[in-house]
Amino acid sequence: MKIRAFKSAPLLLALMAILSACGNSKYQSQGYTADASAGNQAVYTKPKVDIVFFQDDSDSTMYGPINALKAQMNAFTNNLSDRVDYRFVVMPLLTSKDAAFVSSKFIMASDCASAPNANRCIPTGSSARFNSLTADQGWITTANSSVANRDYGFVGIRNNLNALRNSGILRSDAPLITVVLTNGNDVDGAQLTTRGDGVTVISGYNEGALNDHAANIAAFKGSQKQNFYPVIADGGTCYGAPSVAGTRYARMASVLSTYT
């Protein structure tokens, strides 16, 4: 199966890898800060970061590749470190969700006491519990059977980021890391063709539509920094299931990298 991470980042990046060697330079300045206090003791403040996985919930992913990737997905949560003040949540890529869905989600965090719903917050070191959750409470487990060749992932990303922000899970003072895991290609604004998969993969899509999505995603966190990582299929097959090269998501990463 050919799933790759854009710009050579390893498959399903561990948090500290994203923030250091594999991350964008604007994240490398994030670190522990020390302030003077009584008794000349240093007070260390953990850097904040919000991490959102957008998991492809189409039939072609949920009934094939996702099972083969579970070990790597579980390893990601195992490697989350409380050296940073993180919040981690998984949302579907192709289905826009509302406040009721978000309220049912479990998150992982280094500080559950400050989470909006402490009863649905899993602390560092308890990733096995998160990985075992069903009914979309942790990783996405429900397939969206109505997607077919209509992959509108950027719409889902924007709507679901807003739902997470409105719920209080995403913080206004924390940088954002977005990871897209998919074996498909966003077709919003795409030029339909006679191809069997219904889209032109590398060319033929509306660059203006992509730029509009990019501008909205870039503005989502205001002055806070963002990194966008597509973990995408190269095309052909993906663990035996049909896949389309995720060039639109790779292109989005390139466009977003130009924002300051």
Image: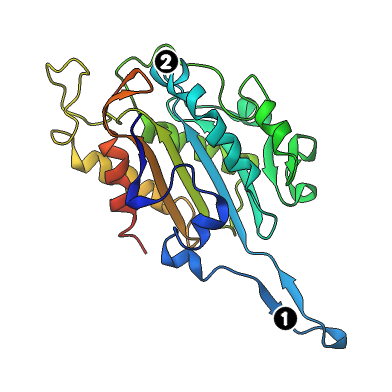
Q: Looking at the picture, does residue 57 appear above or below residue 169?
A: above
Q: Nearer the viewer, mark 1 or mark 2?
A: 2
Do we see residue 187 in this rendering? yes
Identify residue type, mark 1.
Asp
Q: Looking at the picture, does residue 54 appear above or below residue 17?
A: above
Disc 2 crowd rating (10 Å Cα; few below 14, some 14-19, many 20+) is some
Residue at 50% across / 61% down in the picture?
224
Question: Where the C terminus falls, by quadrant?
Answer: bottom left
Do we see residue 105 in this rendering? no
Residue at 16% across / 22% down in the picture?
192
- In-front residue for pair 67/108: 67
- In-front residue for pair 216/259: 259
Query: Which residue matches tag 2?
Result: 59
Residue at 33% across / 33% down in the picture?
2
Query: Which residue matches tag 1?
Result: 35
Q: Looking at the picture, does residue 111 appear above or below residue 200?
A: below
Residue at 19% across / 24% down in the picture?
199
Identify residue type, mark 2.
Asp
> Regarding mark 2 in the picture, which secondary structure is present there?
helix
